[in-house]
Image (tube, coloured by chain):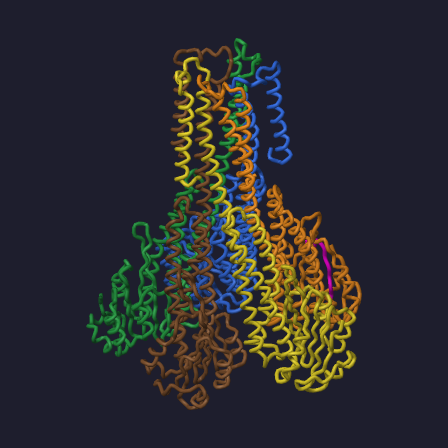
Chain colours: A yellow, B orange, C brown, D blue, E green
């Protein structure tokens, strides 16, 4: 679905133009056309391919979707795939935005999983003509910056989930929940990482040494995006590393708790076993068992049994088993 | 076994030619010969070596088989080994395709484990003369693309197996099955990785910087193959990583379940031990045990015993041990 | 908040100057201005941006804060972010210092979490005119050196915490505490690492091969800082590695202790169970049980029971179970 | 001990020559001398050093032995250390071969742990004059190829050992054996890896970019050796990785089995404890216990006890505890 | 403390010279001065700094000590830090040697933890004038070679400690000792690694590509040192890796032993529980229990009990539980 299709000249909006006129405008000097699609249909992409002269393989990738984030050069033009990440109901939702950038055009196409629209990006760009004058490379930067800025709240969500788990990690009896949450969190982090890591690598090639000719003058802006991605990536690595440690710690806590249960079991078992053994002895049917005849034999027996139990109880208590 | 042997000129099929004429056609300008073998016998390979002038070491490798995926330059020609991967009855079947590519010939030879034939590739190529005109490099691309495209369903199979295991990972009493499945899955992933990783590395050298002269104009196509391999490789890494975590989590789950069993055991043992201790006490043979004489001594004793048991049961229940 | 704003010429302090005059002094040859801010407000940063002609993206980063440590070139000027690390009450406190360096100015801005002020750095620099003559690059070095020197006491704290844990790692019954301390220590190490690792990487680019023009003559000084960071980083890696091993060892110790508890439990259970079994036998109500009639049946029974118990006790003792 | 010492010219054997004449032959154009030593004594090495003009450090290394596999350039000559690997009685035996290669000589010296002799290599080389004509570089290739070809059966042995362990990994009660075998296998793999990995790295520098002048024309042959080493190395990594997983899985299996034992123990303990508790109750000595007087009290009691036991047995069975 | 201070010319010892004359000798052509200090005091270092014109930062590092091993270029001179490693009473003792090397001087300074003196190095060098003629670079090589040669016995000690642990790793009841030894060994290995790894990296830059001008002609000697360090480093990695595996295996062994203890406990508990249950049954006080009246009831009861016990004992035996 076509969202909008606008021609810009010298940093100013020239006009909303019909799709058929794109190839005309594109030929004019100092002019570029910025088209936004959503859930682009194969036919729409074919029209665009003809108007802008896009490379077949790039269009093929856009048609199929499910690409890795990447930045590919086709001659003087770029084909960029970025992933949008949003959180909805605690789940991570990953969408895809394909951007074709040439000397005098930008074509962005987002799929339906991408919850974010780029109307704000266009509006802001139109309010800053001195920036927009830099042409398609600036638009590419603005789009990527908008996408990457939305990674930060997702990162915050992941970090606060991790903190919640960490608060429970040393509580007794929560290990089953903790391990489930850690596993689920790990999956989310992995998903986000798959959006961030290849993009960081790709953006790294838009500043510094050998840079595509389009981005020659905007290196500092792409370095900024690169730096943001670097920060996100370092934070994700940190979360991953902490999750790995937390899983190990969790196992230790299970083992420690088991140990405590075992000790308690051992202690109580010992106490009752000794009582039962005493009772067993005095329950034997020997003819001659003098203490059985005593007036206070029974209270004495109870006293002995309780005494032994108490003695053991205190010893176990001191040893930390009870 | 020779499958077919065809000469092409200017993107058009010239003729099916007999093997003996290959060396003639190969000498004609703008012409190339595309030969397909299956389960090539040493004699067949020797004929081909003479007709095409293949390098001895490359032919030796093709004869022996069981090569790593690789792309080797011998002067102006390339020797390419790729692995086909298919799934049959849930198992991964790995076959091998050896491709010799020169300025004016392509020779592919697949072994019997490679379930896929390349008739479709040839048919499609013949329907696209503008592509086929690019010569042997395009044929190489088409073959590799066909092979790599078959990796995706295998990847899907591995991912859905992993998902099935993940659904059971937190269920009780399934740990033995889970660990077996995880181990089996890990083996499959390793097998696929051994087909993908070296090929990705090798294909990476067919686009970008220093490229063999044959592939000079088809860099974008090989980058596309490279990108597919990259995606598969990232997905495999993801599965591997998840398996590693799942094995750890599985161990934690075993420990947690053991802990629960231990607690239950401790609780019931305590309950019965206390009953037995009481019974033991009143089973002692002391002469003077007044409560034994009471009319309602026995019911009272039972009441005490049941009462203590119930009390303990409730306490254990509240503590989550039962 | 402006801390101070001073112009230097030829290694000597010229004068404290008002902020509005900065742009004048900056234009004079052989002169540079060194400004220190604390908790810089957006308006202050804007004034500075105008006076010094700072790059918008750099100022934007300084305004937002929470940057990764980095060194970015904007034309001939540098934008440097370093993290200060202090320990307060056993906790690690991370602050941020942003430094803008140009041909003839240095502007440092630290946030409120940075417990360290740079008055000492300025005083020392003013006492060494031959160094200060080298201009802003030397000031940058002096500031970074001061920040990095404060990392060492934090490192010492982490190392001595680790040693304390290590002393307890093989003691019985301390596993729960140990694992908690190890986890907390790991978090601190991670925090410090995030300040050190990216800075080390960035400083590495200030000496050796391609160096920003400002730092051309001060390479050896930055190599010194780099070397310090390298040492800290190696020490942190060491701590991390030791923590990982310690966590594993802790788990082993828990398992070993559990084992010992189990053996003891098994041994005592066996001893009492055998007593109870004997007592049970002699407590049976068979009519004809000759030993029950014996004069010394009871002492004999007790002797047998005690004897068997002692025998088992010794055997278990020798086997190391008790 | 001198094995043989032969001069070759133009790919043909010229003559067996005495050691003293080496320096003469070496001076002749288009001629090279190929000497083989075994368990070279210091004096022999000294003679060779003088005849061939070997570098002192290389000879020193050969004298001491126990080198890492390596390829070192000394001016125009090469000093190569490779490890032979054989298996004897299931153990890995590592020997060492030192090879000195110059423009017109090859000197190989193997120690007594190297079970393989190189007579076959020489015989084969003499049968292929067109190859041998390429001079010392070809001889070096032939020697290395012979050594590396012997790695494959060792690899097969390691892989089949691993498979044997894998077949037992999920069997009950084999964990102690498995872990011992895995540990022993790991050691062997490590030993082999130490022979393979540095050699692979070194051989990688004999083809491709900057190549020692001797090997300029034989790059494709060394690439072949490199490729074999790559395959072996990848297979070893695979075994290592599988061993690591198998050790983890083994631990899980131990824990799972323990869990099952615990459950069984808990179940039977519960069944007998309840019997004993019932028996204890009816063994109490209360005066008034009506059921004791009943005609069929005893069978009833037995019925109750057996009934309860059977009920519990079935419940545990259904729960999978028994 | 000054050990000695000697001037050399053309490979020959010229004279022991007083410290004040150093700057004179240093100016003479083809002459160099070799000074050895021990536990250098700040004043001594200052004198040396003046005589040799050492760089301030290098002297500062030497004064402070506790440096990482490193090789730093200051103009045409080198500042080298190496660690000496010795073993005393099974402990690893790490000392530090700082070496300043210029065109015509060598200054070495070792601290008191460095148990090794360099008199032997000097004596050997003076006996080899053809080597010493190569100047300070050769002296540097000789010193480093002497230091690195002392690493090998330490390595042997670590390896034999590991072997001792490995012999006990599958013995029963040694797990607590093993894990302690493994942990202690890991610490030692880490200490040695910190001396070896950075030095190896640094020495790697003294041969091959871009080499400091002083070491231009001695590349092969430094490659030899590099190779030794490589061997040590590979051996250390091997030990580390084996320790990691051994810790895991140890945990498995603990778990396996626990399992066996549990099975035994379960088996004996079952045997005695069944005896007790039988005894309990025949200890019940029912009026009508015919077997109690039988003449041979008691022997029969004992026979039944012993029979059941024996039956269970054999079954458990066969199942490997006892």
Q: Nearer the viewer, residue D201 or C113?
A: C113
The image position of residue A287, as x and y in percent, is 43, 13
The image position of residue B146, as x and y in percent, is 71, 61
Q: Nearer the viewer, residue B130 or A204?
A: A204
Magenta stretch: give its range.
B33-42
Tell me: C210 left or right of B76. Answer: left
Question: Is C241 included in the stretch rendered in magenta?
Answer: no
Whether residue A153 is situated above or below residue D297 in the rendered picture: below
Q: Nearer the viewer, residue C252 or A72?
A: C252
Q: Residue furthest top?
A: E295
Whether residue A291 is situated above or below residue A168 in the rendered picture: above
Residue at 61% in and 13% down: D295
Whether residue A245 is situated above or below residue A25 in the rendered picture: above
Count of residue discs: 0
The image position of residue D43, as x and y in percent, is 35, 55
The image position of residue B181, as x and y in percent, is 62, 46
The answer to whether residue B298 is seen in the rendering is: yes
Whether residue C242 is situated above or below residue B207 in the rendered picture: above
Tell me: B108 left or right of A315. Answer: right
């Amino acid at each position: 679905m076509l969202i909008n299709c606008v021609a810009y000249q010298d940093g100013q909006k020239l006009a909303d133009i019909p799709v058929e006129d794109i190839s005309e405008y594109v030929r004019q000097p100092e002019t570029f056309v910025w088209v936004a699609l959503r859930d682009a249909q194969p036919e729409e992409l074919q029209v665009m391919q003809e108007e802008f002269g896009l490379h077949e393989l790039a269009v093929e990738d856009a048609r199929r979707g499910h690409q890795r984030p990447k930045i590919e050069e086709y001659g003087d033009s770029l084909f960029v795939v970025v992933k949008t990440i949003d959180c909805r109901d605690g789940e991570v939702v990953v969408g895809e935005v394909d951007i074709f950038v040439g000397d005098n055009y930008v074509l962005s196409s987002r799929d339906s999983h991408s919850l974010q629209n780029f109307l704000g990006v266009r509006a802001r760009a139109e309010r800053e003509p001195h920036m927009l004058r830099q042409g398609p490379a600036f638009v590419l930067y603005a789009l990527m910056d908008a996408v990457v800025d939305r990674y930060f709240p997702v990162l915050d969500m992941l970090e606060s989930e991790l903190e919640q788990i960490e608060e429970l990690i040393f509580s007794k009896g929560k290990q089953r929940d903790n391990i489930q949450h850690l596993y689920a969190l790990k999956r989310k982090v992995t998903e986000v990482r798959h959006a961030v890591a290849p993009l960081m690598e790709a953006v790294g090639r838009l500043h510094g040494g050998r840079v595509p000719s389009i981005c020659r003058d905007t290196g500092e802006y792409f370095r900024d995006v690169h730096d943001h991605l670097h920060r996100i990536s370092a934070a994700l690595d940190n979360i991953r590393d902490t999750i790995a440690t937390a899983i190990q710690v969790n196992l230790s806590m299970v083992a420690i708790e088991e140990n405590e249960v075992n000790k308690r079991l051992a202690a109580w078992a010992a106490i009752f076993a000794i009582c039962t053994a005493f009772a067993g002895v005095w329950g034997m049917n020997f003819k001659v068992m003098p203490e059985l005849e005593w007036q206070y034999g029974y209270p004495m027996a109870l006293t002995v049994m309780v005494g032994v139990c108490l003695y053991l109880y205190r010893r176990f208590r001191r040893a930390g088993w009870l």
